[in-house]
Image (cartoon, rainbow, N blue to C red):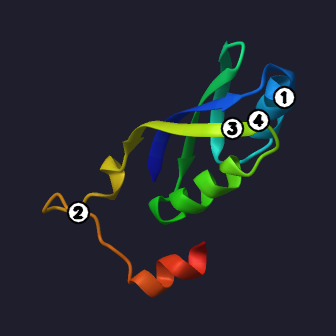
Amino acid sequence: MAIAGFVIQSSPDHLQGLQKALQNLTEVIDSLVVQPDRVAASLETPSLNILRAFKKINTLPGVLNLEIVYINYEDDLDRDGSIACPPLSELRDRE
């Protein structure tokens, strides 16, 4: 699993709807309005799905900018400290 923290910039009139839309996504585990035009949120999803999750969030109504603040893939590390990388064709299929 990957855990990520991010900040979304939105116009103030879209902010409440955006936060509600975030709360309806299964990947999003928390969200909080932190400024009149920004929501901070965190998500948890399998590492292979993180790109798809961010793409889905980025297309929500009112999103002007999505800034990734933190991503942790620690649970996916193998004994050597590496993360298995799927073939590029698999990643394209997941988008």
Measure how far apart labels 2 and 4 are at the Cα level.
Answer: 32 Å
Is 46 placed above or below 90 here? above
Judged from the image, the secondary structure of the residue bearing numbered disc 2 is loop
Per the model, the C-alpha gap separating discs 2 and 3 is 37 Å
Image coordinates of residue 53 in percent, x first then y, are 62, 55
Secondary structure at numbered mark 4: helix
Mark nearer the N terminus (3 vs 4): 4
Give the residue at x 57% y 41%: 43
Q: CA distance from mark 3 to mark 4?
A: 18 Å
The mark lying in front, picked from 1 and 2, is 1
Q: Is residue 82 left or right of residue 59?
A: left
Mark earlier in primary sequence (3, 1)? 1
- In the rendered structure, are the residues bearing label 1 and label 2 in contact, judged by CB atoms less than 8 Å apart? no
Residue highlighted by disc 4: 23
Characterize the local packing of mark 3: few (<14), some (14-19) or many (20 or more) Cα atoms within 10 angstroms. some
Mark 4, other Cα within 10 Å: few <14 / some 14–19 / many ≥20: some
For badge 4, the amino acid type reads Gln
The mark lying in front, picked from 2 and 3, is 3
Residue 36 spot, x, y in % from top left = 72, 13
Circle 1 is placed at which residue position?
14
Q: Which residue is mark 3?
A: 64
Image coordinates of residue 80 in percent, x first then y, are 13, 62
Q: Is residue 67 above or below residue 82?
A: above
- How far apart are labels 1 and 4 at the CA level? 14 Å
Q: The residue tagged with tag 3: helix, strand or loop?
A: strand
Closer to the observer: label 3 or label 1? 3
State the residue at coordinates (64%, 48%): 27
